[in-house]
Amino acid sequence: MLTQLQEETMQELLDQDSPIVLDDVPVDGQKFCRNLKSQKPPGCSGSNPPPSPGITVPGKPVWQPNGCGTGGVANWFVDLVLTVTSSQSYSGNLNSPFAGVSFEGACNSHDQCWASGGNRGVCDLQFRDSMNNACGQLDDGGSQATCMGFASTYHGAVSTTNASNSAHANVMRDRACAIWANDMRENNCAF
């Protein structure tokens, strides 16, 4: 049972806005590492984790966004769909689908938001807003509307499709692995 003084001291510590530092408490490093190792995400390679924003792995390339696309066959398919559905206005460039407007910055920011573990809904809305702001720079109202149509298509592609659900799950899996591997490295735990 705590004494009145102990209770008051404990309450004062809890009421402080600063964290409580327990430098004097011994930590069993082996036990800590075993516990951390047991939290390894499925399929994660500690010695070769995926790149992730803000996490540097010695000897490995840093994370980079990929613009408005996923690469390979997926880009070819998206390009084909945009060409067929918007043949009069599609520029032929996924990063700048409408002449005079670039969505590349919005796409890269969206990639970073997802890859950093940001809230998906917030990331997707920021993406849409950023593209709409880019379209808003156009002088002609008809051009703005066409451009915003592309923005809506891109937003829908990242927020409502099965492919986007799978891509988001993969990004979250990669982030969890990168964080775990980084924690293992920073605490000198063997993989």
Image (spheres, rainbow, N blue to C red):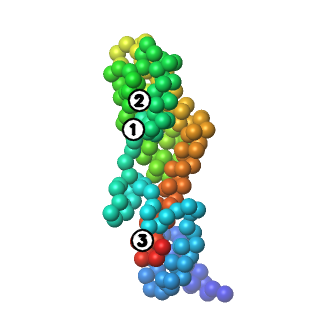
Inter-mark Cα distance, 3 to 2? 38 Å
In this rendered view, identify the residue nearer to me: 132 or 111: 111
Q: Earlier in the sequence, mark 1 or mark 2?
A: 1
Left or right of 43: which side holds 127? left
**On the image, numbered disc 1 is attached to which residue?**
67
Write the residue at 56% across / 61% down. Answer: 43
The residue pinned by badge 2 equals 94
- Residue 104 appears left or right of 184: left
Which residue appears farthest toward the front when viewing the image? 73
Counting the numbered discs, the total is 3
In three-dimensional space, the C-alpha distance between marks 3 and 1, rounded to whole angstroms, equals 30 Å
Question: Element under label 3?
Answer: helix
Residue at 52% x, 79% y is: 32
Element type where label 2 sits in the image: loop
Residue lying farthest right?
1
Q: Indicate the secondary structure of the residue bearing disc 1.
A: loop
